[in-house]
């Protein structure tokens, strides 16, 4: 998942960089934050399954939302507002790939 996400960010980022270098940075940052969020989500899910402590799971989810929501706002403050879109594209690519890979693993057993 990480390799596919980085490859996506590199290819699309190179194309976007010709038009707006800051949008390419936003895409790369979004991908890095998306990967961190995906890995933290996976770890939280594992801990939830092991310890059955939903309060810790909810707290960590809220913290992740707050931290990763601040980053695109900073891009919007210092760059055109549409760079938030590039950030969110990069952010959700790892989660989308994770969903595709998990669904494939469930189908193939």
Image (spheres, grey):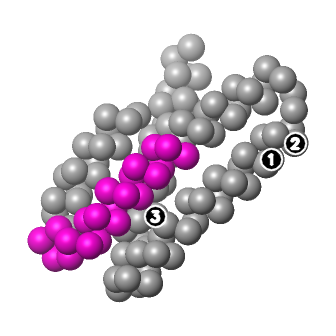
Which residue, given by chain and number where applicable, does mark 1 sit on? 58
Residue 76: x and y, percent? Answer: 43, 81
The residue that disc 3 covers is 88
Q: Residue at x 12, y 71 (%)?
A: 18
Please, which residue is most extreme toward the top here?
109
Secondary structure beneath dot 2 equals helix
Identify the residue at image location x=50%, y=76%.
73
Give me the residue at 19% from left, 52% from top: 11
Does dot 3 land on a helix, a strand or a loop? helix
- Residue 90 at least partly seen: no
How would you rate the neighbour count of disc 3 (Cα within 10 Å): few for under 14, some for 14-19, many for 20 or more? some
Q: Quadrant of the N terminus?
A: top left
Residues at badges 2 and 1 in contact (C-beta under 8 Å)? Answer: yes
> Badge 1: how crowded within 10 Å, few (<14), some, or many (20+)?
few
- Residue 100 left/right relative to 58: left
Main SS of residues in magenta: helix
Q: Position of residue 66 (x, y in %)?
A: 65, 62
Between 91 and 72, the residue placed more toward the observer is: 72
Q: CA distance from mark 1 to mark 3?
A: 22 Å
Classify mark 2: residues with Cα within 10 Å, few (<14), some (14-19) or many (20+): few
Q: Earlier in the sequence, mark 2 or mark 3?
A: 2
């Amino acid at each position: 998942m990480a390799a596919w996400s980085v490859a996506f960010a590199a290819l699309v980022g190179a194309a976007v960089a010709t038009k707006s270098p800051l949008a390419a940075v936003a895409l790369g940052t979004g991908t890095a934050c998306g990967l961190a969020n995906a890995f933290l989500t996976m770890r939280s899910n594992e801990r939830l399954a092991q310890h059955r402590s939903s309060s810790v799971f909810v707290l960590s989810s809220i913290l992740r939302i707050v931290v990763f929501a601040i980053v695109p706002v900073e891009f919007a403050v210092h760059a055109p507002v549409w760079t938030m879109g590039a950030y969110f594209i990069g952010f959700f690519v790892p989660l989308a790939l994770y969903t595709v890979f998990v669904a494939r693993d469930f189908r193939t057993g």
